[in-house]
Image: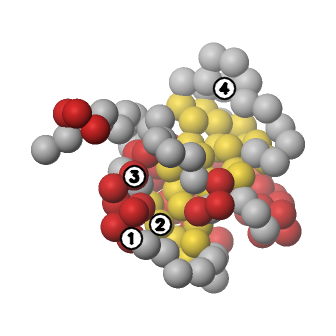
Amino acid sequence: MNRVVHITLSDSSYAEQLIRCLRADPTFADCRILNGNGEELPKGVVNEVRVIDLEHLPQPLSNPAKTVLIASGVVDLEQVWEAGIVSVLRHSEPLEYVKLAILAAVLRPAKPRLPESRRP
């Protein structure tokens, strides 16, 4: 199993609900679903998708194309775009939308963020 969905959210209740939803969905049967607030990332992971909120947004992101941002308040979309994130959802959106964004990130090819010196 080389696919991992790593969920690190401040709202632990929402995170647990999302984890249960993903684990129950056969679409994610070949993915290991981890709670980033307690479970360590296994070694040798090839395809990791990170589901995070702004509080847990590391700078710089190692693989922004594989990051799904869940926003609960006001989001500076310029900051998010500059970080390279293409998947942004609101905390209030249905879990089905979040699952679709996660699936898109799983299927999206990895694209590391360009170093500052190589940006146009």
Residue with the mark numbered 3: 83
Q: Comparing marks 4 and 1, which lies closer to the viewer?
A: 1
Sequence-first tag of 2 and 4: 4
Q: Is residue 70 left or right of residue 16?
A: left
**Residue at 52 percent of width and 81 percent of height:** 74
Task: Give, as a three-letter code, the residue at label 3.
Answer: Ala
Q: Secondary structure at mark 3?
A: helix
Disc 1 from disc 2: Cα separation: 9 Å
Q: Where 100 sits versus 63, above or below?
A: below
**Place of residue 59 in the rendered image (x, y in percent of width and height, measured from the top left):** 50, 45
Q: Comparing marks 3 and 2, which lies closer to the viewer?
A: 3
**Place of residue 109 in the rendered image (x, y in percent of width and height, measured from the top left):** 37, 37
**Residue at 39 percent of width and 52 percent of height:** 83
Residue with the mark numbered 2: 88
Residue with the mark numbered 1: 77
Disc 3 from disc 2: Cα separation: 12 Å
Q: Secondary structure at mark 1?
A: helix
Q: Where 52 sits versus 58, above or below?
A: below
Sequence-first tag of 3 and 2: 3
**Place of residue 66 in the rendered image (x, y in percent of width and height, measured from the top left):** 47, 44
Are the two marked residues, 3 and 2, in contact with CB atoms closer than 8 angstroms? no
Task: Give, as a three-letter code, the residue at label 4.
Answer: Met
Sequence-first tag of 1 and 2: 1
Disc 2 from disc 4: Cα separation: 26 Å
Residue with the mark numbered 4: 1
Disc 1 from disc 3: Cα separation: 10 Å
